[in-house]
Image (spheres, rainbow, N blue to C red):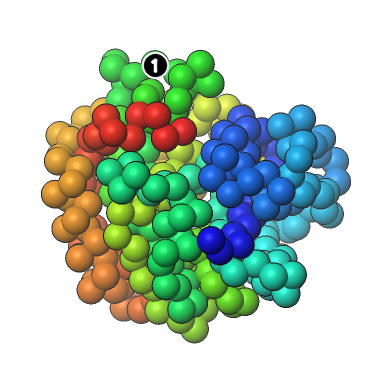
Amino acid sequence: MKRIAALTMVRNDDFFLRKWVEYYGRELGKENLYIYYDGEDQAVADICQGTNVSLHPKIGNHVIAAEKGRLRFLSDRAAELFARGYEVVIGVDADEYIVVDPKLGIGLREYLSRHKIDVCLSPLGLDFGQKLGEEDDLSFGQTFLSQRHYAQIGTRYTKASIIAKPCRWGSGFHRVKGHNFHIAPDLYLMHFGYADVKMLESRLGDVDRVAQGWKKHIYKRSRTIRYATEKKARDFDRWTRLARICQTWCRPPYALNKPAMFELRIVVKIPERFNDVF
């Protein structure tokens, strides 16, 4: 089995970090998790016990500059982990969970150990929303995937999150600079950052996020809740198979190492086989 690390950087995001540590700790071992707090004014959450956690000076005061600085920082940390003997490094935000389709009957570490990765590997992106009128507030009383059943197939979350050698992530882990992307079969990046309307309202009230220029971005991404609520949900297996084909061959002209999907807004219903994953 390969030696695999997962890293993330957080600020004011302990709710999702708790699930991040719980999930990746189970899949990879807590000793292989690396958590960097953006700002020495942050308090380290108790859930981080057993992981490798550290506080760092706050990176940037505006969303664009801060994001570029954050990914430079994390790319450097990933390079250090490779130098220490790791064979694969996963870089994701605290509200992103890379999941192997349960139909395979294997976990994340075994999946990545079996898979040949030249430079980077991308899971298929699923951006979860909340179907208003059907789904309640997100809580830790049940698994997330038993509470949220609708997601948009999103190119923004088909990220080059998994790397097998030192390289440079672009902003948001969306691409690896100077390299193509490869979408893995039966592997998904599940984004939960906009999967709860109350949490979204809380983020809009976060002084730090507003000051950094995140307000417009959050409003824009909140469309996921509207899509989950209003759009007809399509068959998961059929449309994720088609999406992999489409995103593999279609590229935006301004970034040929990112996936495209003709601006299709396809919402799928997540099969029950995923309910107990996290």
Q: Which amino acid type corresponds to the residue marked 1 in the rendered image? A: Asp
Q: Residue at x 57, y 27 (%)?
A: 202
For residue 149, above or below residue 40: above
- Residue farthest toward the front in the current orientation of the protein: 1
Locate residue 190 relative to residue 84 in the image: left or right: left
Residue 187 at x, y percent in the picture: 36, 54
Residue 88 placement, left or right of 248? right
Is residue 126 visible in the rendered image? The answer is no
Q: Hey, which quadrant is residue 114 in on the image?
A: bottom left
Residue to which mark 1 is pinned = 136
Residue 117 left/right relative to 265: right
Q: Position of residue 182 (x, y in %)?
A: 36, 71
- Where is residue 63? Give x, y as percent: 62, 55
Residue 131 on image: x %, y %: 30, 25
Q: Secondary structure at mark 1?
A: loop
Few, some or many C-alpha atoms within 10 Å of disc 1 (few <14, some 14-19, many ≥20)? few
Vertical arrangement, residue 231 with respect to residue 173, above or below = above
The residue sitting at 82% across, 53% down in the picture is 56
Nearest to the observer: residue 253 or residue 96: 96
Could you tell whether 78 is left or right of 101 in the image? right
In terms of image quadrants, where is residue 180?
A: bottom left
